Image: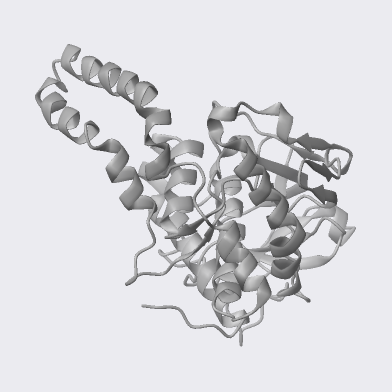
Amino acid sequence: MFKSVNLYPQVLNVREMFKKEVLMYQRVVPTLIELFPSDPLNVFTPSYHSHEDLLVFENLRPLGFRHVDREQGLDLTHANLVLTELGRLHGAAYVLHSRSTEDAKALTDAGKEVLFTRQRRGVYEEGFAKISAETVEILRENPKTRVHADKVEAILARKYDILLDLLRPKDDAINLLNHGDLWTGNLLFRDEEGCINRKCTHVCLERESGQPFKKNHSQYTLTGIRTPERKPTAWHRRIRGLRRQSRIVWFVGDREDPDSNNRGLDGWYTDRSNKVPVQVVFLDLQLCRYGSPGLDVNYFLYTSTTARMREEHLDELLRTYHWSLVRTFRQLNARAKQ
C-alpha cells in the first residue's frame, strides 16, 4: 500500500503531517516496539519504505484485517481491545519520552502540534463559524434544548481558544504521545473463530488450541487451568500477533473473581459466526500530538462507540484502559505522576 503527500488537500497542513508520519515510522515506531521484546506491540502497520514524500506499507487484507462499520460503532469486545492496546502504546510512549536519548527527541518532534495552532486559526474560522451557527440554530428550534442555546453560543464563540487549551500539555499532569486521530476509520481488526464468556477468564481460539470449543469454561483461569490455590483475578485472552507471536492482552482491568458480583456483564460477546477480535492495528500516525492521554481516550470513545454503549459500560472501558496503562508502566519499570 502506497501513501503519498500529493493525495491530500493543502488546507490540512499536510506537508508537516506527512513529515510527522515519516518520522514516526523511521524512528519512533521501531523504538517503541523494541521496548517489548517478549510481549510484542503489534498495533503498527509494517512499513517497507519511509521517505519524505512516500510511505510503503504491507497490505494487511490478505492477513485477515478489516474495517468495521463506522456508522454502527464498536461493540464492547472491540472497544476493550482498542483501549487495552492504547494503554500499552501510551505507557511505552511515556517511558520513551522520559529517557534522554535521540529516540526520545524524535518522539518529542513527532508530538508537535501541526493541525491546530494559533498561527492556523484563520484556516478554520469560516468552517467553525458555520458549524457553530448551525448548532445553535438546532438548539433554538427544539423546545427541550432552547434554554441552553445562549450558553452554548457563548462557549462556541471561544471554541478555538478552548481547543488550544485542551491540546496544551499541562505541567502538573501526565503527558505522553497520543495517536491523535484514533477512531473507527483508522482501526483495522483481525478476527478468529472463538468465543468470549464473561463468566469465565478465558477466550478460547480453536486455531490455537486445536480442540473444539468447550461448553464448560470454568476450568480456565489465568494459566488456563483452574486450581483451588489460584483464583482468577482478571479476564484475558491469548492472541497471536502480526508475525504469529503468542502473547497475552488483558481484556478488562483488575477484577475480582468472575463468579462474584463484581464481574461486570454476564453472557457472550460474539456474533453468530463466533468471530472474536484478536488484534487491532492503528492507522494514520500523521496527527500524533504530545499531551494528556485523555485526548486519545475521549476522542476514541466519543467517535467510535454509541451513547448507549458509554452509558452502560463507560466505567468498564475506562478501567480496561487504566489497567493496561498501569500494567505497562510496571512492565517497563516506570513511575508516572500521580
The vertical placement of 277 against 146, above or below, is below
Q: Quadrant of residue 241?
A: bottom right
Position of 49 compared to 99: left or right? Answer: right
Q: Position of residue 228 (x, y in %)?
A: 61, 84
Position of 126 compared to 327: left or right? Answer: left
Q: Residue at x 39, y 56 (%)?
A: 315
Q: Position of residue 223 (x, y in %)?
A: 71, 76
Evaluate whether residue 232 shows in this view. Answer: no
Evaluate whether residue 140 shows in this view. Answer: yes
Q: Quadrant of residue 7?
A: top right
Front-lying residue, 3 or 204: 3
Q: Residue at x 28, y 24 (%)?
A: 132
* Quadrant location, the N terminus: top right
- Count how many numbered circles sit on residues in the image: 0
Q: Position of residue 218 (x, y in %)?
A: 65, 65
Pick out the residue farthest to the front. 119
Pick out the residue farthest to the top. 141
Q: Residue at x 41, y 69 (%)?
A: 174
Q: Residue at x 39, y 35 (%)?
A: 307
Position of 276 compared to 75: left or right? Answer: right
* Quadrant location, the C terminus: bottom left
Front-lying residue, 81 or 159: 159
Q: Quadrant of residue 6?
A: top right
The vertical placement of 55 against 228, above or below, is above
> What sort of colour scheme is used for the picture?
one colour
Q: Position of residue 68 (x, y in %)?
A: 65, 33
